[in-house]
Image (tube, coloured by chain):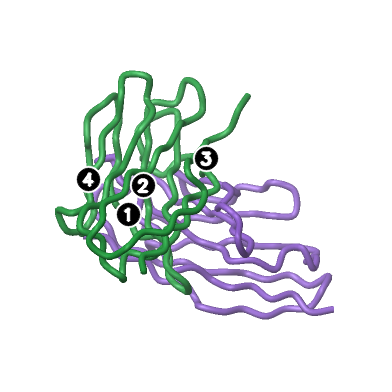
Amino acid sequence: KAGVTQTPRYLIKTRGQQVTLSCSPISGHRSVSWYQQTPGQGLQFLFEYFSETQRNKGNFPGRFSGRQFSNSRSEMNVSTLELGDSALYLCASSLQEATGQEAFFGQGTRLTVV
Amino acid sequence: GQSLEQPSEVTAVEGAIVQINCTYQTSGFYGLSWYQQHDGGAPTFLSYNALDGLEETGRFSSFLSRSDSYGYLLLQELQMKDSASYFCAVGTNAGKSTFGDGTTLTVKP
């Protein structure tokens, strides 16, 4: 079956702009989590959606938001982009809620803010 | 909140055995997972422990002690392709996964 698909793979934006990233989970998976990864850093948790509901949110400013659709596809939006938002954004899907069990990651969207 | 600690770097030679430790602090602990990430790639799932004990999957094994809030990943018969970053991740019953900062494993010939 198809894996987790993230689009776009690469993105260059200017400070102050906004961006929307998309994640299509594995078919049948209802949980989608988003992470930010910067060079040399671990994966910083952004938020997790399960059945269209945001269940958890990490310590990120309100400029970071997301949503999940009825088909489990998820989008995250970052408004008023800052240079520090440059990172690899990863989404992970899992069959059940993100209790730490097996999660499948997409290849990520590499966002560069100039 | 949750916090995890794992070594930042580990170096070993091909054919050797290496252990990567992970200690955690969290409420509502549900399970401990391990992921491998090669440079430029996506993290891939290696193993998951919800109960105390050892889980073995080929050359990789993972151990959990819930009473000690401690786990480790054991890699045997190291190969050059095992050079990567390894992350431990704690899941909670609130449905949140927190990742450690990762351990960079370098395998030398």
Left or right: A28 as drawn, with respect to A20: right
x and y percentages locating residue A29 in the rendered image:
44, 26
| Residue A52, quarter of picture | top left
Colour assignment, chain A: green
Q: Residue beneath label 2, please?
A: A34
Colour assignment, chain B: purple
Q: Residue beneath label 4, please?
A: A65
The answer for which chain carries disc 1 is A
> Do badges 2 and 1 share one subunit?
yes
Which label's residue is closer to the chain start, 3 or 2? 2
Pointer 4 and pointer 1: residues touching (CB < 8 Å)?
Answer: no
Above or below, comparing residue A84 to residue A10 in the picture: below
Which label's residue is closer to the chain start, 4 or 3? 4
What's under tag 2, amino acid-wise? Trp
x and y percentages locating residue A64 in the rendered image:
22, 51
> Which residue is painted at 45% across and 59% down in the image?
A88
> Which residue is painted at 41% across and 67% down in the image?
B23
Pointer 2 and pointer 1: residues touching (CB < 8 Å)?
Answer: yes
> Do badges 2 and 4 share one subunit?
yes
